Image (cartoon, grey):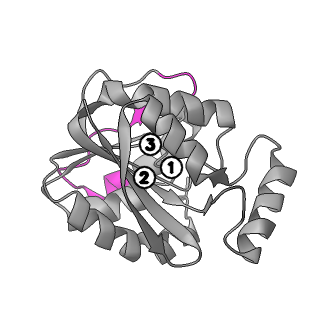
Amino acid sequence: MDKPFAPSCERNREPILDVLRKHFADARSVLEIGSGTGQHAVYFAAAMPWLDWQCSDRAEALPGMKLWLDEAGLRNTPTPIELDAAAGPWPGKRYDAVFTANTLHIMSWPSVQALFAALPAVMADDALFCAYGPFNRDGRFSSDSNRDFDAWLKARDPESGIRDAGALDALAAASGLRLIVDIAMPANNHCRIWQHDD
């Protein structure tokens, strides 16, 4: 089996790392939701050795992800865990930070709702949740390319699509999470970071 490869991970990893280095500086443990190929995990864990970076994804993604993790041989990337945001099972521990990249527009809306509802149980007091990807504002696309991307997503899966930032903030608030920063990123993406106020 060849290692899976996502070109977007190579393009966006450095801008994301700049954000995480600043905001995860005091964290010691991170749960990544939807780790995909594992490319982000090995890059971020190598660059931030003070973090234990816990990968997770649905069962079908784990074999390819393990190829990346095994090749890197990092001490701070534990064995990845199976996690379906809609169905669980969620880990029985609390993390200092939670990270996800390019997942919220792939998941169905009920899965996004389930993810936010589950976050408080896996977040320590004052923990941060960082979500990277494209977001709409007040139902409007931020660019023509995002509108085209949304149409492509919906043609592939009608339940997917770019999410509205306000709708996500409402889900976050219902789970005791408060938006602390929204950072514009290259290629019409954003890093939105919420804090768990327990």
Kind of residue at disc 3: Ile
Q: Quadrant of the C terminus?
A: top left
Q: Secondary structure at mark 2?
A: helix
156 or 7: nearer the eye?
156
Circles 2 and 1 in contact, beta carbons < 8 Å: yes
Which residue is denoted by mark 3 in the rendering?
33
Q: Residues within 10 Å of mark 1 (few under 14, many from 20)?
A: some
Magenta extent: 69-88
In the rendering, which numbered label is found on residue 64? 1
Which residue is denoted by mark 2 in the rendering?
67
Mark pair 2, 1: CA separation? 5 Å
Residue 54: x and y in percent read 31, 42
Does the magenta segment cover residue 86? Answer: yes
Q: Is residue 150 above or below residue 62?
A: below
Kind of residue at disc 2: Leu
Does the magenta segment cover residue 58? Answer: no
Q: Is residue 67 left or right of residue 168?
A: left
